């Protein structure tokens, strides 16, 4: 029996002490250490994020104490895809005092802007002055437009409604509008036929969404190459939807110099005392399709008589089954014959004189995709010689319109809870860009 030997009771108490030390000292110490580490890590990451946020926010607010919150909110709003209310100060900073003009149209001039978080934007400064009386209507429309999302629609980030500045802020499209590419003098430098076909299809999908899929039907009224914008991959995005509605509410303060639609693209019913429906966009899309096929403006007074108006010339060739003449003129390769024939037939169907004989856009999409056969179009220009024909189009009419029958036109502008802003803004889910 050695003094160093341990009795069973000794061994038991030693084990008990070790277990107690592990349970009550070591484990809590490990837990504290882990927690400390985590806190340090998060703190480091958080301070990095705040620095980043503060760095990108500088143009938005001069008061550094509010910067991080404002920027987080801005990014959050963009993510949640709700329209943002910008101040004129913010837009002046983002556009470097409206120094880079991208172009101008009936509603105003468009400027390039870059927010310091790197987000590029196109700021459309609207003609006329702001009038508080129409503020709510303006916000209601902007709210609807701002929450209309589709891959083939240009996104509206937000707007500004101040007495000195009324503007709409859109996502920036690097490749500009389709007209700049279609009507280039040097055809070799323009977009290839395959890409143009994709652009036509994308545009059709965007319009179909506006007409048949979004909660509140939006008739564009101004489909034309200038309103088809191209992103970095030359994907088509329809711009300026909802604007006609926005401005028809009150014409006394904003003047639409061009009236409704653009000559050459506007459907006949737009300038005649006839009811106007979404079918006016189908007509304009048809005219756009002719320009995509021809890579020229439909009307060119500098050309000889028969070629001056491309759609009529194209119809005559189609009727005489001389598509090859058109293909040579348009520089379209033989391998694309089937596609161009389909596109031409769709264009001819879309520009029918009577709205009810034009297809709805979802049918146009299917025909362009090749998923649906295109029926032989009637002469869309017969009214030019013999008045409006009553040619047996009933079957076509039924087929064209069946798809959209389930659509409901009820207004959908839901109420919501937003922490900041006026009651009107809360009503239309508009949030402010900075604190
Ligand atoms: N979101 C945008 N991104 C890039 N360029 C744009 C954007 N919106 C408009 N533009 C450019 O500004 C020009 C003017 O636009 P707009 O005022 O809508 O007139 P229009 O539609 O009659 O051409 C367009 O042709 C286009 O080149
Ligand atoms: Mg436009």
Image: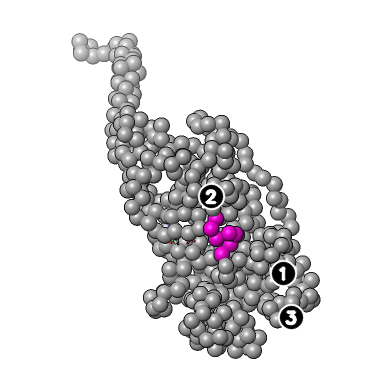
The residue indicated by pointer 1 is 354
Q: Is the C-beta of the residue carrying label 1 under 8 Å from the nearest atom of ligand 1?
A: no
- Residue at image location 61% in from the left, 66% down from the top: 266
- Residue at image location 61% in from the left, 86% down from the top: 317
The residue indicated by pointer 2 is 254
Q: Is residue 383 visible?
A: yes
Residue 253, above or below 132: below
Q: Earlier in the sequence, mark 1 or mark 3?
A: 1
Where is residue 393 shown, x and y percent of the image? 77, 73
Residue count near mark 2 (Cα–Cα under 10 Å), binned few <14, some 14–19, many ≥20:
some
Residue count near mark 1 (Cα–Cα under 10 Å), binned few <14, some 14–19, many ≥20:
some
Mark 1, secondary structure of its residue? loop
- Residue at image location 65% in from the left, 64% down from the top: 271
The residue indicated by pointer 3 is 386
Mark 2, secondary structure of its residue? loop
Q: Is residue 153 visible?
A: no
Tell me: 332 left or right of 55: right
Mark 3, secondary structure of its residue? helix
Magenta: main secondary structure: loop
**Magenta highlight range:** 256-262
Q: Earlier in the sequence, mark 2 or mark 1?
A: 2
Q: Earlier in the sequence, mark 3 or mark 2?
A: 2
Q: Is the C-beta of the residue carrying label 3 under 8 Å from the nearest atom of ligand 1?
A: no
Residue count near mark 3 (Cα–Cα under 10 Å), binned few <14, some 14–19, many ≥20:
few
- Residue at image location 29% in from the left, 29% down from the top: 40
Measure the C-alpha gap from mark 2 to mark 1: 31 Å
User: Is the Cβ of the residue at disc 2 closer than 8 Å to that at disc 1?
Assistant: no
Measure the C-alpha gap from mark 1 to mark 3: 14 Å
The C terminus lies in quadrant = top left
Place residue 117 in its image quadrant: top left
Viewer-proximal residue among 373 and 37:
373
Where is residue 279 shown, x and y percent of the image? 67, 63
């Amino acid at each position: 029996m050695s003094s160093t030997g341990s009795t069973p009771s000794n061994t038991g108490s030693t084990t008990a002490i070790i277990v107690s030390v592990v349970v009550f000292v070591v484990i809590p110490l490990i837990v504290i250490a882990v927690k400390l580490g985590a806190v340090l890590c998060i703190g480091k990451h958080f301070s990095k994020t705040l620095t980043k946020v503060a760095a990108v926010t500088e143009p938005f607010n001069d008061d550094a104490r509010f910067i991080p919150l404002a920027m987080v909110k801005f990014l959050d709003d963009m993510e949640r895809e709700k329209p943002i209310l910008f101040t004129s100060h913010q837009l002046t900073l983002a556009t470097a005092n409206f120094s880079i003009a991208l172009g101008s149209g009936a509603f105003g001039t468009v400027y390039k802007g870059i927010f310091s978080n790197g987000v590029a934007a196109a700021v459309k400064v609207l003609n006329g002055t702001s009038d508080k009386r129409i503020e709510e209507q303006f916000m209601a429309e902007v709210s609807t437009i701002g929450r209309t999302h589709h891959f083939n629609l240009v996104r509206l980030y937000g707007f500004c409604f101040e007495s000195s500045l009324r503007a709409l802020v859109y996502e920036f499209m690097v490749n500009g509008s389709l007209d700049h590419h279609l009507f280039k003098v040097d055809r070799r430098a323009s977009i290839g036929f395959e890409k143009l076909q994709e652009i036509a299809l994308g545009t059709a999908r965007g319009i179909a969404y506006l007409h048949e899929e979004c909660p509140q039907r939006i008739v564009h009224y101004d489909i034309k190459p200038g309103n088809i914008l191209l992103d970095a991959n030359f994907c088509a995005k329809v711009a300026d939807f909802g604007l006609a509605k926005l401005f028809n509410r009150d014409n006394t303060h904003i003047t639409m110099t061009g009236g409704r639609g653009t000559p050459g693209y506007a459907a006949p019913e737009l300038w005649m005392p006839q009811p106007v429906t979404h079918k006016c966009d189908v007509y304009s899309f048809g005219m756009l399709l002719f320009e995509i096929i021809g890579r020229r403006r439909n009307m060119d007074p500098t050309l000889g008589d028969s070629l001056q108006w491309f759609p009529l010339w194209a119809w005559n060739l189609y009727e005489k089954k001389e598509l090859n003449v058109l293909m040579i003129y348009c520089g379209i390769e033989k391998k694309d014959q089937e596609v161009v024939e389909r596109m031409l037939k769709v264009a001819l169907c879309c520009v029918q004189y009577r709205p009810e004989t034009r297809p709805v856009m979802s049918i146009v999409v299917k025909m362009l995709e090749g998923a649906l056969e295109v029926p032989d179009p009637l002469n869309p220009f017969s009214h030019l010689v013999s008045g409006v024909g009553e040619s047996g189009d009933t079957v076509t009419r039924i087929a064209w319109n069946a798809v959209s029958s389930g659509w409901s036109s009820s207004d959908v502008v839901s109420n919501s809870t937003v922490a900041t802003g006026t009651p009107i803004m809360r009503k239309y889910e508009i949030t402010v860009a900075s604190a």
